[in-house]
Image (spheres, rainbow, N blue to C red):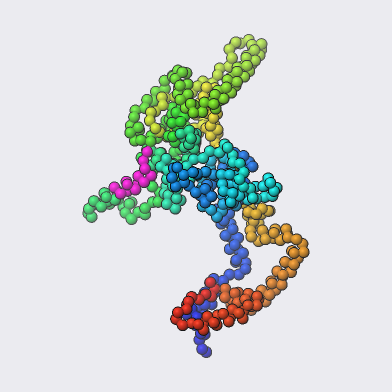
Amino acid sequence: MNAPDPQPNGVSWTDSISQSSQTSQTAAEFIDDQLRLEADAREVLPYAFDVCTQPLGPLRQSLFSCLTCNPPPSGPTEAYTPAGVCYSCSIACHGEHTLVELFSKRNFVCDCGTTRLPSTSPCSLRINQRTALKGGCRSEGPASENRYDHNFQNRFCSCEIRYDAEKEKGTMYQCLGLGHAEDGGCGEDWWHPACVVGLKPDWDEKAKGKGQDEKRRTQPGDEVDAGHDGEVEDDDPPLPPGFPEDDSFASFICWKCIEVFPWLKRYAGTEGFLKPVFKHEADATREVKTEKPDHSAAEVDNLRGSSSSKSSSRKRKAEDDEEDTTSDSSKKAKVLDNETDKESKLNDEPPPTKPCNYKTLPPAPTGLFSLFLKSDFRDHLCHCPECFPDLARFPQLLEEEDDYQPPLSESGDEAAGGSSVGSLLDRGERALNNVDRVRAIEGVMVYNDLKEKVKAFLKPFAETGQPVGAEDIKQYFEKLRGDAEAVKAANAAAMGDGGDDGDRRREQRGK
């Protein structure tokens, strides 16, 4: 028996069958692979993205900046309009654009479909007020309360670095964000540990270079630490000197925000707070007194007042509210005291007020430093009537904040609607249910006819156990369309022109 002729690409017939069997799969396997891919996609994008958050108003939510719609300025004088979009719009409206993930920012309303973004990028998720239809929302008025900083230009930290997830090493930490950028604060910026303590982000590279120099000076006969011999270099750089260990704090307030609100300085090193982490190493050597003197009320008010000059209107309103609260509480105390006098006749004094713990704190350290907070720091902040107005301005100091999260994307077998949930099979069935009855019946008849033809084509392969290759399927559908003869003629013409000057590329079977 003669051996089968080799294929045009030099692969024998048996090798070609082997290749086909390795790359072929049954319909059930294809569906399983498709469902597995969709499950992986849901792990990366776990939330449904069919609803814009703009109608919900200001939220603490995950934001994205679109660099395609609003490219960062090339210079400080170039005009630039920052904008942030919510999680859903980042996928549904800007899915093919270059995005910067800003993570969570508080009190923000989605800018998608507003004048902060080009009219060529409308919001496809909201109801258009002019047409009463979903999508096409453009050039609407943005929320005036939104705050913007350099993060929207893909710049982070005090070093103004352009963030590149592929190149960035180590962990960055987000400040609790008490002050806005226009006030001198950081606006919930993300910080390198090195920049927190006043070093440059690449400080470890210089230190590593010195270490390599020391290693080169080591003589062959010198002892070498076995733990470092052949050690694989860690991608994460070490923490800089003075920066606390990651598990020793829950959050932190950067030195920028501390300078805007210096009354917080006195909490450094007290219960619920770590010792101050100075920006400059020279500041860390300064002696800080630890005694707890009883400062006068005037001194305490002077320290607090130094942080309120830039926001006097809000501070004044808080003080007015506090006066009302104090007067109301005193009235209630008097009523309670009168009732007590009538019933017990034991004393004539009102109940004692809560003492001010802030006055017993040690003096504030001098210099620029950041404040690192333990998980229970809120329990140790002074809530007396004098101190509470300062805290009331910052809800994040009173209780832990909750970030808005869209509804979870349902799994394929539990999906019940929506363009962003369910498997492709489920979504196809739902689309079929929405088609006109006559067209749906016609489509089902065409599908059944095609199914019978494909079944007849696959039957010989199933009976013989021969795998179905890509070339087999291609030839079958060429024949089904009636263009098989034209394809053969074109192939014959191409082979006839031949010579050594033609394109020798050939499609491999099973690819």
- Asked where in the image residue 239 lies, by quadrant, the reply is top left
Query: What residue sits 69% from the left and 71% below the top?
Result: 451
Query: What residue sits 53% from the left and 34% below the top?
Result: 396
Tell me if residue 297 comes above or below residue 150 in the rendering. Answer: above
Closer to the camera, 328 or 107? 107
Would you say residue 276 is visible in this rendering? yes
| Residue that sits furthest to the bottom in the current view | 1
Q: Answer with left or right where residue 262 lies relative to residue 94.
A: left
Q: Answer with left or right where residue 50 lies relative to residue 252.
A: right
Query: What residue sits 56% from the left and 44% below the top?
Result: 116
Tell me if residue 423 comes above or below residue 361 in the rendering. Answer: below
Closer to the camera, 84 or 234? 84
> Residue 503, percent across and down?
48, 76
Query: What residue sits 42% from the left and 30% below the top?
Result: 269
Closer to the camera, 341 or 363? 363
Tell me if residue 487 comes above or below residue 123 in the rendering. Answer: below
> Residue 240, percent across and down?
37, 42
> Residue 218, percent across and down?
24, 51
* Residue 123 inside the magenta-drawn segment: no
Q: Answer with left or right where residue 301 lies relative to residue 433.
A: left
Region rendered in magenta: 198-211
Q: Name the chief secondary structure element in magenta.
A: helix
> Residue 191, percent across and down?
44, 41
